[in-house]
Amino acid sequence: MSCPDPGFPQVPFLGLDTLWFQVAGTVCNLRCTHCFISCAPDNHSHGMLDLPTVLRALDEAVELGVQEYYFTGGEPFMNRELFAILEATLRAGPATVLTNGLLLDPRRCARLKRLDEGSEYSLDLRISLDGWGPEDHDRIRGPRAFDRAVAGMRNLWNAGLNPVVTVTELAEGVAGAEGRERFLDRLRSFGLTRPRLKILSLFRLGAEQRRGRGYLPSERLTSGDVIDPERLQCSSGRMVTSRGVYVCPILIDFEGARLGSTLRDSLRPFSLAYPACHTCHVQGVTCRT
Ligand code: SF4
Ligand code: SF4
């Protein structure tokens, strides 16, 4: 068990309301140059989650009062059990899948719509973009990634599902009210007449350290910083991976952020000793929708 580190503020544990699953491990069909956990086709540092593992965590989560579920990777649709996993999850609560959109063909989108319609809870899909067009996005994500992501959005829309589009601050000028409005217009131009947009900060970890830069020594919390636990997802969320339960979706490459084998093991305060905690604190970042 980790001990409080007196050099850093501690985030209290307020109760578990959000549960993440690293459902595709660190395996992805892309190799984005800004990926903060360096996911790639050949990165198996975290394995895919199988259905029995997810079912065990869901049982525990329901007993603990979890309110919503998120699935990420890597690319979740590379997990062949994803649909069975979502079907089981949607019996317990609302679910959101974070995807690069490349595998969202019309057949998968129709299946997702059926899952959504068959549940009293909502199913949301989140597709990520890193630019206004292929010239920015594909530089980060690889050839044709932008056009394929937009095709995935349209397939969802045509199936009757309205995706949440996330865009990182690498899309120049997107932050701020005017940039946000222009990006919403860009999404309308793809046919999403009721666009939903979330803007994400960059974490200077993994591949992003090589593309941009790593954290500076000054980008670190200290014991004198007053944190607001309500703004930090680690006060009320946890991440299930093939290697155990981690404090949040951001720190799965750090053994010190592994809190145990089961959810119950993980329900305790955490010392905010990682540079990425500085980003969460300063920018109020949450990976939730
Ligand atoms: S940023 Fe997303 S799509 Fe890109 S490599 Fe990482 S997990 Fe895959
Ligand atoms: S990276 Fe963010 S969410 Fe994770 S432990 Fe640090 S403050 Fe909490």
Image (spheres, rainbow, N blue to C red):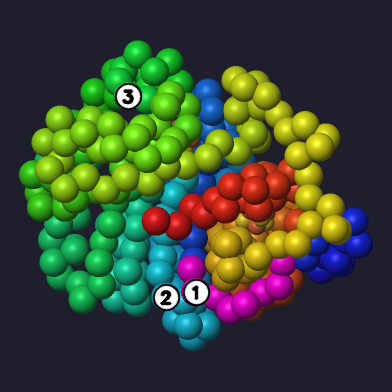
Q: Is residue 269 left or right of residue 46?
A: right
| Contact between labelled residues 2 and 1, with CB atoms less than 8 Å apart | yes
State the image quarter where residue 120 is shown.
Answer: bottom left
Viewer-proximal residue, 257 or 216? Answer: 216
Q: Quadrant of the N terminus?
A: bottom right
* Nearest to N terminus: mark 1 or mark 2: 1
Task: State the image coordinates of residue 122 (x, y, percent, origin top left).
Answer: 25, 67
> Residue at 65% across / 48% down in the picture?
282
Q: Is residue 179 left or right of residue 186?
A: right
- Dot 1 alpha-carbon crowd within 10 angstroms: few under 14, some 14 to 19, many 20 or more: some
Asked which secondary structure carries label 1, the reply is loop
Residue 96: mark in rendering: none
Does residue 123 sit above or below 133 in this rendering? below
Residue 67: mark in rendering: 2
Task: State the image coordinates of residue 57 (x, y, percent, origin top left).
Answer: 50, 71
Q: Residue furthest bottom?
A: 63
Residue range corresponding to the magenta coloring = 11-18
Q: Quadrant of the C terminus?
A: bottom left
> Residue at 11% across / 36% down in the picture?
191
> Residue at 34% across / 63% down in the picture?
95
- Dot 2 alpha-carbon crowd within 10 angstroms: few under 14, some 14 to 19, many 20 or more: some
* Nearest to N terminus: mark 3 or mark 2: 2
